[in-house]
Amino acid sequence: MPPTEPPQGENSPKASGKPKAKVRRKEPPSDVVGIEVGAGLAEGAPAVRLHRSPEGFLRIVAAGFVPVVSDIESIRAMPAEMRGPWSLPPAFRAPAAALAVTAPDALVRQSDSVEDATADFDASTLRTKASATGKKGSLPFVAFMPEELARRVARLLPEGRKPTAVSIQVSPLARVNAFAASPALSAAGGTAVLVQIASNTTTIALFAKGAVALYRELSVGEEDSLHAVAGPMNVDNATAKELLEGGLVDPGPFLGPLVMPIFRQAELSTDWVLRRNGLVVEKFFVAGPPALAPHWAAIFRDQTGREATTCDPIADFPQEEGANLPPDFDKVSGRFAAALGAAAAAMQEEEEDAT
Amino acid sequence: MSRLVHVNLLREEERRGHSPIRARVMVPMFSGLALLAAAVWAGLALLSNAMLRSGNARAEEQIQEQSATVARYESIVARKAALAAEAGQLDRFLDGRVLFGPALAAVAEAVPEDTALARLELSYPLPVAARPAPGAPAAKKAPPGATLRLQGVTSRPRDVEDLVAAIREGGATNAFVSAAVPPGSFRTDVTPGTFRFEIVAAGAPRSFSPPPKTPPRRAPAAAANGGGNAP
């Protein structure tokens, strides 16, 4: 599906003639722990604690898997009146917490209206929120998740103890924010394309001058990629993953048909940015599981001749001296993307509009 | 500088504080304590007010009870003052009284044998003072004394002189302060060797000196006017 130019018709927030929503700015917190809810990991919920130095630089203070009940089905099954079942280890007790929710119905879409973004859902059961008016040439972001899920997530952390929730975000957008906060994007001059591989989805985020200009989510992810490799090789997904991680096989012939449409979308996005903003996008980043990201990048290089590099926004992120990190942080750092992105987004000046 | 997209689905009312001291708990608690303190203070004020009212009522009852006694006491004091004023006036009257009996007896004793009294006249004007002019102080002129006028016949002129001397210096001095034969009143009678004479004796002026007592503190108006009992 080729990227479409954002409409500037009568439904566009800019062209609709509606008065611009009043923007209210709040003092952002400087010490936040980001936690991914619904990651579905046996180790626990990924959590990253960020601290902003007096000079304004973000650094990782602690990262790890906190032993709390965080699978999404258990949270959905919690009694509505239950409050504060979570208790975090001391290293993660920042004053504020940002929660990134990973669920099939916790999504973000770029749309000019909440109704369009949630058209395939029962809007009455959703909690929705749109970002402030987008930058030039970009549409607002509409995040949503079921109201009942949002209520339960808001009550996971207790009152009267650190941390308390200051933000609930959806994981896909939090992962994009993790890349936006990483040194990789700064090194690319703020203009790049990110292809983020998740379990069942892949997101394409195009950054122009440091801001997300275009966001697309495609229903092809890690599971599809592993299946595409495992099927022809007659192995299971886990074995295929091990083979891919070891570099023992060239998955190009298997993954090419699956991946190329995604990169075609990315290329079309760069054309749109070129026409729209006059910006030439030369940097392509692929982030995701170590078993897949290098192969996806290699396929893109082979097929288009453009430079594509893998990136791990978390591993490259500055760390506080003596930060509390797990021993194998380099291997599992990709799992903290949503947690870090949520924390980083909550630490920037928040803009709220009336949605 | 990268710009992150923060779309926060947490509602404002879902935000919680991490401080153990929660404003939404402490504010109502302190408000309740303040209200309780105000209620206690109001209760104490009402109780104090009620006690003061009760004390006032008791004091008024006692005043009511004592007022009858005070009125009785004041009436007694007034009555006493009136009686004292009346007694004082009686004392003045007694002090101003002139007893003529002994003086006349002394005059009778002093009449010589060859002298006969034909007429004895004792005039005693009432001590009525003239009404003073409005605003003018009352006159302090002493009331006039009595006048004794004796007329008689004697064969010895010397006896007339003795009688005058007896009145002037004898036992009648308490009543009369002077005695004399008015000029031209000693003359010969139709009977040869006898003489008619007249002696006029002036009594001492009456004195109503105040009694040597301390005047009463209060006297009712009627007692102060008290002229009804005055002589």
Image (tube, grey):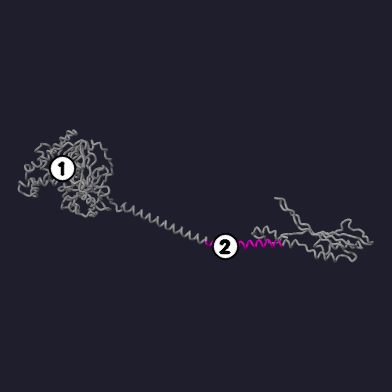
Q: Chain of mark 2?
A: B
User: Where residue A10 sits: x, y (%)?
Assistant: 22, 36
Q: Residue A346's quadrant in the figure?
A: top left
Decide if residue B113 is on the left or right side of residue A353: right
Q: Check disc 2 and report the residue beneath it.
A: B68
Decide if residue B73 is on the left or right side of residue A89: right
- Please, what secondary structure does the residue beneath circle 1 have? strand
Q: Nearer the viewer, residue B112 or A323?
A: B112
Mark 2 and mark 1 in contact? Answer it, CB < 8 Å. no
Determine if the magenta segment contains residue A16: no
Vertical order, A229 against B217 (above or below) = above
Q: Main secondary structure of the magenta part?
A: helix
- For the point 66% across and 59% down, which residue is it? B222
Q: Nearer the viewer, residue B78 or B37?
A: B78
**Where is the C terminus of chain A found, in terms of image quarters?**
top left
Residue A15 visible in rendering: yes
Q: Check disc 1 and report the residue beneath it.
A: A217
User: Where residue A75 sits: x, y (%)?
Assistant: 19, 53
Q: Amino acid at mark 1?
A: Glu
Q: Chain of mark 1?
A: A
**Start and end of the magenta stretch?**
B61-90
Q: Amino acid at mark 2?
A: Ala
